[in-house]
Amino acid sequence: MKERIALFKCRDYDFDLVYFSLQRVIELLGGIEKFIKPKSKVLLKPNLLLGISPQKAVTTHPQIIRAVIRILKTINCEIYLGDSCSAWVNAKKSGQVYAETGIEKLAHQEDIKLVEFNNFVWKQKFPLTSWLDFCDYFISLPKFKTHDLMLLTGAVKNLFGLISGPYKIELHRRYFYPQDFAKVLVDIYEIARPALTIIDGVWALEGDGPGTNGIPKNTGFILAGKDAVAIDSVLALIMGLKPLDIFTNREADIRKLGVTELKEMEILGDNIEEFIDRKFKLPSTSLIRKVPSPFIALAKKMIRLYPSIKYKDCVRCGACVAICPAQAIGIKGEKISIDYAQCINCFCCQEACIHGAMKVKRSILAKILGL
């Protein structure tokens, strides 16, 4: 039987439109009770990377979350909402993020419990939020965005936010190659699979996402299903890529944890061809993958893409210093500085910078090669 994925257009965040579109998506999949039992406890896990206005398209929009809450209320669920945000944010406490992303106000208006992922339970080798054990189900609500390290942050990548606090930095330090980090993400998916994943694809980020260097783009859809790998495969196609261009899809495909081929899916609702954008801007870091690997092996020290500080935008908030897994960033005098001998090019600093002061720079050879 083919994996069922629902895709339906939604051009803006007007609540009536969002609710109608989400209802349609859920109906196409067989109704909410196919995934969630009535009167159960449900954890909603959006992408709340930074404390920033939802208009920036960095975080899951409150109206998407509100629509999910309203649908769950029709079957009398007890609803909990939270995310661990970034490691830097946790150091500052998540309350500020909840306020600035509109999530705190939403939780108050909808009378649901807003929770923090402070407590965790070790599940295999990961400290995952204890709310997973407290709740009967969890629903993942990712934002559709590009990602400098992983190319795409969608259904599988959103689960990284189940990990509590500073341990995220430790995982980035240990697994800084994309292929290795993909294995970590798929490990988490194998341990903690959502009952349902609903993608906020109304506005996405293209270019150098997933933070403030990304470019907001009106992609105009809501996408949902149970198989997170199939969902990410559809997102790859919408980006003009092949599903196996995404490292997490490739790793999940090896483990037989999800569907990556379109022929094995039944996409319900609108035609995917309406949303495919072959001019979708990918992260700058993705371009180096087009160079044949033997050449990179010979010239890896000369072909580099690395973070660089745009000092006119830097306010020395210290987010990049706190989140750097290699401890390669510090404050010297009145400026932030990067020790490139220690830098592992994971671009966590760019992800954490709310001011857009971390840019991707290219070495001279990389520029000559058109990377």
Image: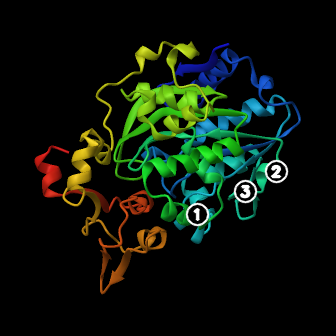
Looking at the picture, tell me which residue is in the foreground, 193 or 106: 193
Residue density around tag 1, few if under 14, some if 14–19, many if 20 or more, within 10 Å: some
Residue density around tag 2, few if under 14, some if 14–19, many if 20 or more, within 10 Å: few
Q: Would you name the residue on which mark 1 appears?
A: 96
- The amino acid pointed to by label 3 is Thr
Q: Quadrant of the C terminus?
A: top left
Classify mark 1: helix, strand or loop: helix
- The amino acid pointed to by label 1 is Gln
Q: Is residue 143 above or below residue 10?
A: below
**Measured Cα–Cα span from mark 3 to mark 1:** 19 Å
The answer to whether one can see residue 46 in this image is no
Residue density around tag 3, few if under 14, some if 14–19, many if 20 or more, within 10 Å: many
The residue under the point 71% across, 64% down is 118
Q: Is residue 190 above or below residue 168?
A: above
Classify mark 3: helix, strand or loop: strand
Residue 148 location, x and y as percent?
A: 38, 49
Q: Would you name the residue on which mark 2 appears?
A: 133
**Measured Cα–Cα span from mark 2 to mark 3:** 8 Å
Checking the image for residue 129, the label placed there is 3
**Measured Cα–Cα span from mark 1 to mark 2:** 26 Å
Q: Is residue 249 above or below residue 55?
A: above
Looking at the picture, tell me which residue is in the foreground, 263 or 146: 263
Q: Given the current orientation, which residue lies at the most extreme bottom position? A: 333
The answer to whether one can see residue 333 in this image is yes
